[in-house]
Image (cartoon, rainbow, N blue to C red):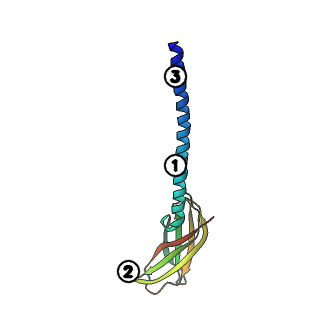
Amino acid sequence: MKRSIRIALATCLLLAACKSGEQKAKEEKAVYEKQKASLADREKEQPKDFITVSGHDRRNLIGQTVVKIKLVSKAAVAVYKDVEVELAFFSKTGTLLEKDTEIVYETLPPGSDTHFKTKYFAPKGTDSVALKVLSAKVAE
Protein backbone atom coordinates (compact mmCIF):
# COMPACT_ATOMS: atom_id res chain seq x y z
CA MET A 1 0.00 0.00 0.00
CA LYS A 2 2.76 2.45 0.96
CA ARG A 3 4.63 1.56 -2.19
CA SER A 4 1.65 2.29 -4.47
CA ILE A 5 1.12 5.65 -2.73
CA ARG A 6 4.77 6.53 -3.30
CA ILE A 7 4.54 5.57 -6.97
CA ALA A 8 1.34 7.59 -7.41
CA LEU A 9 2.90 10.58 -5.67
CA ALA A 10 6.06 10.34 -7.79
CA THR A 11 3.96 10.10 -10.96
CA CYS A 12 1.93 13.19 -9.97
CA LEU A 13 5.09 15.17 -9.25
CA LEU A 14 6.62 14.08 -12.56
CA LEU A 15 3.52 15.13 -14.52
CA ALA A 16 3.34 18.44 -12.67
CA ALA A 17 7.00 19.11 -13.46
CA CYS A 18 6.44 18.39 -17.17
CA LYS A 19 3.47 20.76 -17.35
CA SER A 20 5.36 23.53 -15.56
CA GLY A 21 8.27 23.04 -17.99
CA GLU A 22 5.93 23.52 -20.95
CA GLN A 23 4.38 26.56 -19.28
CA LYS A 24 7.82 27.99 -18.56
CA ALA A 25 8.85 27.49 -22.20
CA LYS A 26 5.72 29.32 -23.37
CA GLU A 27 6.40 32.20 -20.97
CA GLU A 28 10.03 32.47 -22.10
CA LYS A 29 8.92 32.50 -25.74
CA ALA A 30 6.40 35.26 -24.99
CA VAL A 31 9.08 37.34 -23.24
CA TYR A 32 11.48 36.79 -26.18
CA GLU A 33 8.84 37.87 -28.71
CA LYS A 34 8.06 40.98 -26.65
CA GLN A 35 11.75 41.93 -26.47
CA LYS A 36 12.16 41.28 -30.19
CA ALA A 37 9.19 43.54 -30.97
CA SER A 38 10.59 46.20 -28.65
CA LEU A 39 13.97 46.02 -30.38
CA ALA A 40 12.32 46.21 -33.79
CA ASP A 41 10.41 49.34 -32.74
CA ARG A 42 13.59 50.96 -31.45
CA GLU A 43 15.46 50.10 -34.65
CA LYS A 44 12.65 51.59 -36.74
CA GLU A 45 12.43 54.80 -34.69
CA GLN A 46 16.19 55.49 -34.48
CA PRO A 47 17.85 54.07 -37.61
CA LYS A 48 20.91 56.32 -37.34
CA ASP A 49 21.80 54.66 -34.02
CA PHE A 50 22.05 51.30 -35.81
CA ILE A 51 23.99 52.36 -38.93
CA THR A 52 27.68 53.21 -38.83
CA VAL A 53 29.46 55.05 -41.61
CA SER A 54 33.13 55.12 -42.47
CA GLY A 55 35.12 56.07 -45.49
CA HIS A 56 38.07 57.79 -46.98
CA ASP A 57 38.70 60.41 -49.65
CA ARG A 58 41.26 61.08 -52.37
CA ARG A 59 41.75 63.41 -55.30
CA ASN A 60 41.39 62.18 -58.87
CA LEU A 61 43.21 63.49 -61.97
CA ILE A 62 40.70 66.24 -62.74
CA GLY A 63 40.69 67.62 -59.18
CA GLN A 64 37.54 66.02 -57.87
CA THR A 65 37.40 64.64 -54.35
CA VAL A 66 36.38 60.98 -54.55
CA VAL A 67 34.74 59.78 -51.32
CA LYS A 68 34.35 56.05 -50.75
CA ILE A 69 31.68 55.31 -48.14
CA LYS A 70 31.01 52.11 -46.22
CA LEU A 71 27.69 51.69 -44.38
CA VAL A 72 27.31 48.93 -41.80
CA SER A 73 24.00 47.91 -40.22
CA LYS A 74 24.17 46.90 -36.55
CA ALA A 75 20.44 46.20 -36.51
CA ALA A 76 19.13 42.77 -35.58
CA VAL A 77 15.69 42.99 -37.17
CA ALA A 78 15.16 46.11 -39.30
CA VAL A 79 16.09 46.40 -42.97
CA TYR A 80 17.09 49.93 -43.99
CA LYS A 81 17.05 51.69 -47.33
CA ASP A 82 17.74 55.16 -48.73
CA VAL A 83 20.35 56.10 -46.14
CA GLU A 84 21.07 59.85 -46.02
CA VAL A 85 24.74 60.65 -45.35
CA GLU A 86 26.16 64.08 -44.57
CA LEU A 87 29.59 64.97 -45.97
CA ALA A 88 31.39 67.83 -44.21
CA PHE A 89 34.50 69.27 -45.84
CA PHE A 90 37.13 70.68 -43.45
CA SER A 91 40.33 72.72 -43.90
CA LYS A 92 43.71 71.89 -42.33
CA THR A 93 42.83 74.07 -39.34
CA GLY A 94 39.51 72.29 -38.78
CA THR A 95 37.30 75.00 -40.25
CA LEU A 96 34.08 73.76 -41.80
CA LEU A 97 34.11 74.75 -45.47
CA GLU A 98 30.99 73.09 -46.82
CA LYS A 99 28.33 70.48 -46.05
CA ASP A 100 26.56 68.29 -48.57
CA THR A 101 24.18 65.36 -48.30
CA GLU A 102 24.13 62.20 -50.32
CA ILE A 103 21.45 59.50 -50.34
CA VAL A 104 22.57 55.91 -50.80
CA TYR A 105 19.72 54.19 -52.66
CA GLU A 106 20.41 50.63 -51.57
CA THR A 107 18.91 48.24 -49.04
CA LEU A 108 20.86 47.43 -45.92
CA PRO A 109 19.75 44.14 -44.29
CA PRO A 110 20.54 43.42 -40.62
CA GLY A 111 24.23 42.80 -39.98
CA SER A 112 25.31 43.63 -43.53
CA ASP A 113 27.34 46.38 -45.16
CA THR A 114 27.37 48.23 -48.45
CA HIS A 115 29.89 50.36 -50.29
CA PHE A 116 29.21 53.59 -52.17
CA LYS A 117 31.38 56.06 -54.07
CA THR A 118 30.67 59.70 -54.87
CA LYS A 119 32.64 62.54 -56.47
CA TYR A 120 32.65 66.24 -55.55
CA PHE A 121 34.46 69.36 -56.59
CA ALA A 122 35.31 70.13 -52.98
CA PRO A 123 35.91 73.72 -51.86
CA LYS A 124 39.41 75.10 -52.19
CA GLY A 125 41.56 74.24 -49.16
CA THR A 126 39.75 71.01 -48.29
CA ASP A 127 41.96 68.73 -46.21
CA SER A 128 39.50 66.15 -44.90
CA VAL A 129 35.94 64.92 -45.18
CA ALA A 130 33.76 63.85 -42.23
CA LEU A 131 30.82 61.48 -42.69
CA LYS A 132 27.65 61.21 -40.61
CA VAL A 133 24.37 59.28 -41.01
CA LEU A 134 21.43 61.67 -40.90
CA SER A 135 18.51 59.33 -41.52
CA ALA A 136 17.31 56.15 -43.19
CA LYS A 137 14.00 54.64 -44.19
CA VAL A 138 12.85 51.25 -42.97
CA ALA A 139 12.11 48.79 -45.76
CA GLU A 140 8.79 47.04 -45.21
Answer few, some or many: residues within 10 Å of disc 3's Cα (few below 14, many 20 plus, some between 14 and 19). few
Amino acid bearing label 1: Val
Labelled disc at residue 9: 3
Outermost residue to the top = 1
Residue on which disc 2 sits: 94
Mark 3 or mark 2, which is nearer the start of the sequence? 3
Q: Secondary structure at mark 1?
A: helix
User: Helix or strand or loop: what does disc 2 sit on?
Assistant: loop
- Residue 5 place in picture, x, y as percent: 52, 17
- Which residue does the image show at 56% across and 37% down from the upper left? 22
Q: Whole-Å distance between the Cαs marked 2 and 3?
A: 79 Å
User: In this rendering, is residue 22 above or below 49?
Assistant: above
What residue appears at the point 38 percent right and 80 percent down from the top-left corner? 94
Along the viewing direction, whichever of 13 and 103 lies nearer the viewer: 13
Q: Position of residue 127 (x, y in %)?
A: 43, 80
Placement of 134 over or under 37, stated as above or below: below
User: Is residue 45 something that shows in the picture?
Assistant: yes
Left/right of residue 95 with respect to residue 49 in the rendered view: left
